Image: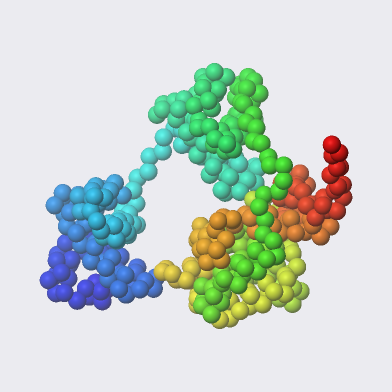
Amino acid sequence: MLEHYIRNRKKLAAMKRNYLAPYLEKAAERYHADGFCFRYAQRLVGFALPFARWLGTGHVPPDQITLEHVAKFLRWYAPTSEKSPRKRDLSRTAARNVVRQIQAAHPPVVTRSPSRVEADRYGDHLRRNRGVSEGTVENHQRNLERFLTFCFQQRPVDPSIFTARRVHAYVDALPHGRSNCVRRCTCTALRGYFRFLQMQGVAIGSLIAVVPTVRTPRAAVSPRWLTSADTEQLLRSIDRSKATGKRRYAVILCMIHLGIRVGDVARLSLDDIDWREGTVQVANHKPDRPYRLPLPQRLGKALADYLVKARPVSQQREIFLSHRAPRGIPATTASLKGVMRYAWRCAGLNEKFSGTHVLRHSAATRMRQKGVSMKSIADVLGHKSVQTTKVYAQVNLPGLRAVAQPWPEVRS
């Protein structure tokens, strides 16, 4: 496959003489199989040769090559002081792709620290016994591992040395902010971990009670939400003559009409839609409790238009797929967030709105303004508790305007 991209005979011969030639060949085959643009893949293959030569001068065995070698290579070949960031980006991508092929043939031996082992044990408990979503599990594991590393470094974990003073010292050293998100999430992870130890029969005393409760002030009114004019402005800005535009239009309508999370949009599959009954099943990955919603006509037409005219040919069952190389793989949550950022910019609304969750807030706010009960809104959003729903639909502003009394006149 190297011959497909490299037409220069001397350069091709140099590649085939290099001791990493089999991995360069596999990287080229991967570019072709994933449908990369020819010119882009050709440049990646070309930039892989300096990396292979640099490794050869250092006599680095293939089974010892890691991403750390990529960082060292970039400092030598494309330092940040150079005025060609494109060269650095292509070199980094090409080198990392070669390292991936090497590591696929020589899987690296991963050594986990005692703190990581304990954090993984707690994560398994959250998945198996608590049914916590994967994103929340990873967040708890990350925060717990940092705390355990702070306490033990590379030593074995010994819960008997946990004290209130040590817990408070760690929490106080965390960064403060307006929302105190890091401190709040860390305290939640510690509280859950101490409960886990208690269930295992470990004597922890009153550690659960000494973990600080980090308060987060909530706004007196609902977060920003899209009015009907904002919604139409957003949808009109989408160029639906292109395949990516059809996908963007359908993705945004899923969040506007159904009020579902962007992660659940990425998880939508062809099997989730019942076209005859006009319903769609939402994965509801956070509490892991799927539920069904009616499929609005406008959304149904947008999905059908995308599936028939724009969706890449693929064996995948997910509805929304990647339109860039590698084409045909399921779109990730991160990529759909990028789609939304681009949509805000195109609509000229990036000064007012950001992210994807504002669409979920907007759906709840519109339902509340139309007189829908909080319990019904909770069912649509997939919440177990109505208290959670109140965060999304805190204030019915039109209703308040209707009952507001005129301001009394002040006579001098």
The x and y percentages for residue 83 are 24, 56
The x and y percentages for residue 122 are 56, 37
Q: Identify the residue at the far front of this view.
A: 412
Residue at (46, 25) in percent of width and height: 151
207 lies above or below 396? above
Image quadrant assignment for residue 271: bottom right
Residue 135 lies left or right of residue 215; in this view the side is: left
Q: How many marks?
A: 0
Please state which of residues 239 and 21 is positioned toward the viewer in this rendering: 239
Residue at (68, 40) in percent of width and height: 218
Please state which of residues 275 and 240 is positioned toward the viewer in this rendering: 240
Image quadrant assignment for residue 183: top right
The x and y percentages for residue 341 are 52, 60
Please state which of residues 287 and 102 is positioned toward the viewer in this rendering: 287
Residue 158 lies left or right of residue 28; in this view the side is: right
Residue 77 visible in the current orientation: yes
Q: Quadrant of the N terminus?
A: bottom left
Residue at (54, 42) in percent of width and height: 139
Q: How is the image coloured?
A: rainbow
Q: Identify the residue at the far left of this view.
A: 10
Q: Quadrant of the C terminus?
A: top right
Please state which of residues 115 and 54 is positioned toward the viewer in this rendering: 54
The x and y percentages for residue 221 are 72, 46
Residue 186 lies left or right of residue 388; in this view the side is: left
